[in-house]
Image (tube, grey):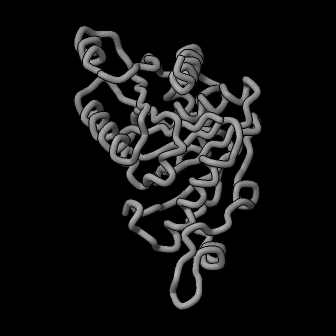
């Protein structure tokens, strides 16, 4: 199984990357689960499935599974049935879930919603087969060490600009803090220039690929179609191959 978390500051294109990778893996015959763990909740649209109910809104289910007697919480509630019950599948048969709001309280936050959502992540990371893609926020600390241990690779999506690279430094620190060892970088919205080349040369992590700037992404957004139906897939196919090599240590 391949387990990939994708992070980056808002607007860099991490949801687009997640959606296109899901499409490419599915096209290659993998069973793909894509989880939207970003509060913006854009992944279902990018995968062409429309609305998917956030798991954090399942108050009755959370109360039933998490709350114990006398105000106690079950830290490992049953969630094995959640994937099929509260997910949607697109035309590629990619299974799509939306995590919803999860507090960034580290492993010490034991509110019922967090216990339930972390159990979802643990179940996905340790039990589901083939490919799992997590579309994260820039802050990944809410994964916590218990779930991060199952992540094979964290992909940081950056633009060739200083603010995005500052976010990369933060992502790298958070990854180290919660035990994710492998971090790769994807450069998006690339426009050839001496300054852009210089910034890329300063990246001290493996660069999995570079996605050139294209109006096709804007077109896909305006027409509300999945990006993989409108853009050149070659850079993304290269990224997919490189991340698999990195995960497999080759």
Identify the residue at image location x=73%, y=23%: 28
Residue 208: percent from the left, percent from the top? 46, 20
Which of the two residues, 228 or 157, is positioned nearer the viewer here?
Answer: 157
Q: Quadrant of the C terminus?
A: top right
Residue 236: percent from the left, percent from the top? 55, 20
117 vs 184, left or right, is right
Which of the two residues, 148 or 114, is positioned nearer the viewer here?
Answer: 148
55 up-or-down from 188: above or below: below
Q: Quadrant of the N terminus?
A: top right
Identify the residue at image location x=49%, y=33%: 153
Q: Is residue 177 visible?
A: yes
Residue 37: percent from the left, percent from the top? 51, 50
Q: Is residue 232 visible?
A: no
34 up-or-down from 114: above or below: above
137 vs 64, left or right, is left
179 vs 63, left or right, is left
211 vs 33, left or right, is left
Residue 184: percent from the left, percent from the top? 42, 27
Identify the residue at image location x=51%, y=51%: 147
Identify the residue at image location x=30%, y=17%: 200
Number of labels in the image equals 0
The picture quadrant where one finds residue 193 is top left
The picture quadrant where one finds residue 21 is top right
């Amino acid at each position: 199984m391949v387990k990939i978390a994708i992070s980056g500051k808002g607007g860099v294109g991490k949801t687009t990357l997640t959606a296109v990778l899901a499409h490419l893996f599915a096209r290659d015959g993998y069973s793909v689960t894509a989880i939207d763990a970003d509060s913006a909740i854009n992944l279902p649209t990018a995968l062409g499935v429309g609305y998917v109910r956030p798991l954090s809104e399942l108050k009755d289910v959370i109360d039933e599974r998490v709350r114990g007697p006398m105000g106690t919480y079950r830290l490992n509630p049953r969630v094995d049935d959640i994937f099929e019950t509260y997910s949607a599948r697109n035309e590629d048969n990619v299974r799509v879930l939306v995590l919803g709001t999860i507090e960034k309280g580290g492993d010490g936050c034991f509110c019922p919603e967090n216990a339930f959502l972390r159990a979802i992540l643990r179940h996905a990371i340790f039990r589901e087969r083939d490919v799992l893609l997590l579309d994260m926020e820039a802050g990944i600390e809410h994964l916590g060490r218990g779930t991060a241990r199952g992540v094979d690779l964290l992909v940081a999506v950056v633009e060739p600009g200083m603010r995005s690279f500052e976010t990369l430094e933060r992502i790298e620190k958070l990854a180290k803090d919660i035990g994710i060892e492998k971090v790769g970088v994807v450069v998006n919205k690339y426009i050839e220039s001496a300054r852009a080349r210089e910034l890329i040369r300063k990246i001290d992590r493996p660069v999995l690929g570079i996605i050139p700037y294209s109006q096709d992404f804007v077109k896909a957004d305006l027409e509300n179609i999945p990006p993989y139906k409108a853009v050149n897939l070659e850079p993304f196919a290269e990224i997919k191959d490189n991340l698999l090599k990195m995960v497999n240590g080759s």
